[in-house]
Image (cartoon, rainbow, N blue to C red):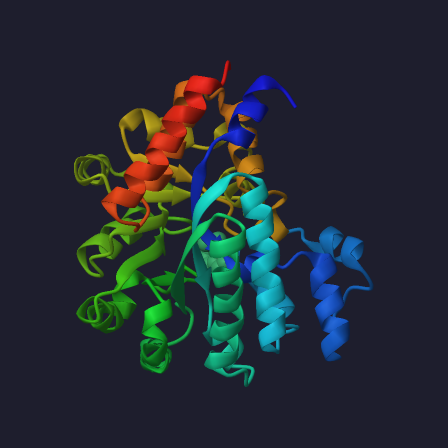
Amino acid sequence: MDLLACFIAGMPKAELHLHIEGTLEPELMILIGKRNGVSLPYPDGEAARKAYNFTDLQSFLDIYYRATSVLITEEDFYDLTIAYLRKAASQHVRHTEIFFDPQSHTARGIAFETVIRGIERALEEANSSLNISTKLIMCILRHLSEQEGLEIFEKALPWKRWIAGIGLDSSERDNPPEKFRKLFERAHQEGFLTVAHAGEEGSAASVRNALDILHISRIDHGVHCMEDEALIDELVRRQIPLTVCPLSNVRLRVFKSMKEHNLKNMLRKGLCVTINSDDPAYFGGYINENYIEAANALDLDRNDIIRLAQNSFVASSISTVHKEFYLKEIDRYIEQESY
Ligand code: ADE
Ligand code: ZN
């Protein structure tokens, strides 16, 4: 590993855009599939990896939803979540805000309770044994109706103590933020943190509407905000965080190559950008690989890396005291590192 990669690897950081179903590594998928008698179109993990050739978001989502069909028991959700948390802790992730997609499980007849109990058991274990803090964000699938979203929202309320936020994911095309106005009103009434995927494949208008109509406090992806100067000014002024996922954007062809990614331009504009892994089992890397590949392709320097790590805590939904605690950890790390 070169010096920059070492500096990145040891840096304390937060991850704010991570779909737990997107951490299902092919080998674990095959193992759980066999355990549950669910057949898959791949003989082994290697064959699955080879089939992960995406042309856009939808071609990825088709494969991703199919893979999640192996997840059936509470144990499966625990195994999935603890595997991600071990990996994240090994990459010096100190705090993570994890998305889950309950509708992709309840639609297959899996009880909401099974999903959330399995995930929560892993989170509790990680909080005490892996020295990592966590929050859970329940995502609503935007390709389904708002009514279906409202139904899962109401079903989740008895588990509110374990859910910090409500998000919006899946196919952005033809499913604009305004489709979920009522649902996000309910989320605000119930006091949840609210976030939404916007401006991934969609335009700057999608980011604008997520802000103005859904009143969310953080944008997931948001890279297309760069098409609208007035929007950029507002995002900078309000320091609305944008959780960017570089490897995902290249694998889903939002950008042709990492060199063409606009992350550095976003940083230079003063946007509160963070780096995240989205669906690491599918896109070729966890958070450190995202930092390292972006840094190499875009020539990011030491200060950019520090800023990105600081942003990740500032943009998180933890308390001010908790943020200061982690920001001090970064200060101590950079004092002791020679890079
Ligand atoms: N679900 C999982 N990954 C996603 C992404 N990158 N965009 C939208 N929905 C998703
Ligand atoms: Zn995502």
Q: Quadrant of residue 333?
A: top left
The residue at 63%/59% (across/down) is 24
Find residue 101 and report its horizontal and vertical position in percent.
47, 68
Q: Nearer the viewer, residue 230 or 69?
A: 69
Find residue 250 and report its horizontal and vertical position in percent.
54, 40
Is residue 101 toward the left or the right of residue 325 in the image?
right
| Residue 224 visible in the snapshot | no
Q: Residue lying furthest bottom in this view? A: 109
Q: Nearer the viewer, residue 20 or 46?
A: 20
The residue at 75%/65% (across/down) is 30
Task: Tell me: residue 202, above or below residue 124.
Answer: above
Is residue 128 toward the left or the right of residue 264 in the image?
right
Task: Tell me: residue 141, above or below residue 55.
Answer: below
Find residue 277 and report its horizontal and vertical position in percent.
51, 46
Find residue 13 and report its horizontal and vertical position in percent.
44, 38
| Residue 187 visible in the snapshot | yes
Q: Residue lying furthest right in this view? A: 43
